[in-house]
Amino acid sequence: MATRTSPSLPYAGTQSVRRAIALLKVFSDERPEWGLSELAREARLNKTTAYRLLTALQAEGMVARSPESDAWRLGSEAIALGALALRSNDLVTAARPELEALVRETGETASLEVLVGDEILILDGVEGPALVGASSEVGTRWPAHATSTGKVLLAAGSRGRPPGRGARRLRRLTPRTITDPARLERELERVRERGWATAVEELETGYVAVGAPVHDHAGRVLAAISVGGPAARLTARRIPGLARRVADRARRVSRRLGSVS
C-alpha cells in the first residue's frame, strides 16, 4: 500500500522460476509421484537441471522425496499454499463488493489482507479515484507491526504472538513506526478494545490507514480490510468516521463467510 510507482523491470532468473513451476505442475491427483527421469521428461528438462531445481524446491518444502521409492511428490509447503489459495478465493469473492463500496464511500484505496508470519499479504485491492493516492498491489507484503491490518490481525492472535516479542527492537520504517515490543503490546490492547486499528505514517511518511477484522464462520479473525491514503486527507478528525465504515464493511464480509458476530 505504498505510493504509486512505475512498473518494475523484469527480474533476473525468470527462466529458473518458470522451470521450477513447470516441475510442480506435472504433479496431479492421477499421478502424485514421479521418478526423476520421468519428471524431467514430462517437464521438458534435462535430468541435471530437473534435479537441481527439485533440490531447491525440497529445501523450501515444496516437494518431498520418498526414502522408500526415491520418488518425488508435492511437499507440505505446496499443500499448505494450495489450501491457502482455496481459502483466499472464497475470501476475495466475499470481500470484493465491500472493498468497492468502501472506495465509493470514502474515495480512498481499500484492500484485503492476511497475516503471513510477521508480514501482511495483500490478497485484493481497489484503488481510489484520486490522482494522488495509494496503490494496493496484490501480492505485496509489509511488516505487520507498521500496518493497520497487521495490528488488527496481531491483536486477534490469529497467527500467534506479535512479532518481536522478546526481541529488543522492531524494524523501523519511518520516524513514527512502533519499534518497542512493549509499546506494540499496549497498542494491540487498544485495538482489541475498540475493534479497529490505525497506522498513522508508520509504514510510510504521509500515509495513513484504518483497518478492521474479518471473521470466519467460527468467529475467528482470518483477515482484515482497510482504507488508506494521504495524511492530508485521512486526518485525525476523519479517522473515527472512516473506522466505523471500515468496521461495518468488515462485518458484512464476515457475514458472507458465515459469521454471526
Image: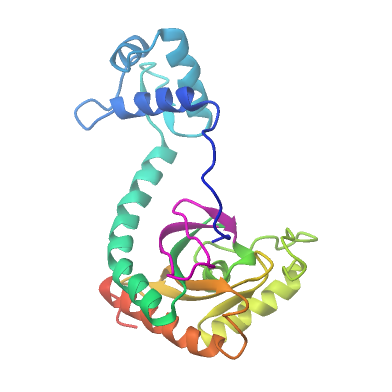
Q: Nearer the viewer, residue 151 or 60?
A: 151
Instruction: Identify the residue shown where x is 53% and y is 89%.
Output: 240
For residue 150, above or below residue 26: below
Question: Which quadrant, please, contains the N terminus?
Answer: bottom right
On the picture, is 239 further left or further right than 86? right
Is residue 185 visible in the rendered image? The answer is yes
The residue most toward the front is: 131
- Asked if the stretch drawn in magenta spans residue 226, the answer is no
For residue 3, above or below residue 217: above
For residue 140, above or below residue 215: above
The percent position of residue 2, horizontal first and vertical second, equals: 57, 60
Quadrant for residue 249, please give it. Answer: bottom left
Instruction: Identify the residue shown where x is 39% and y is 22%.
Output: 66
Q: Nearer the viewer, residue 5 or 85?
A: 5
Instruction: Identify the residue shown where x is 69% and y is 72%.
Output: 184
The percent position of residue 3, horizontal first and vertical second, equals: 58, 60
Is residue 65 visible in the rendered image? The answer is no
The percent position of residue 16, horizontal first and vertical second, equals: 48, 23
Question: Which quadrant, please, contains the C terminus?
Answer: bottom left
In the rendered picture of this protein, how many numbered marks are placed on residues? 0
Instruction: Give the magenta range.
Output: 120-143
On the picture, is 15 further left or further right than 74? right
Quadrant for residue 73, please give it. Answer: top left
Quadrant for residue 173, please give it. Answer: bottom right
- Asked if the stretch drawn in magenta spans residue 135, the answer is yes
On the picture, is 213 further left or further right than 42? right
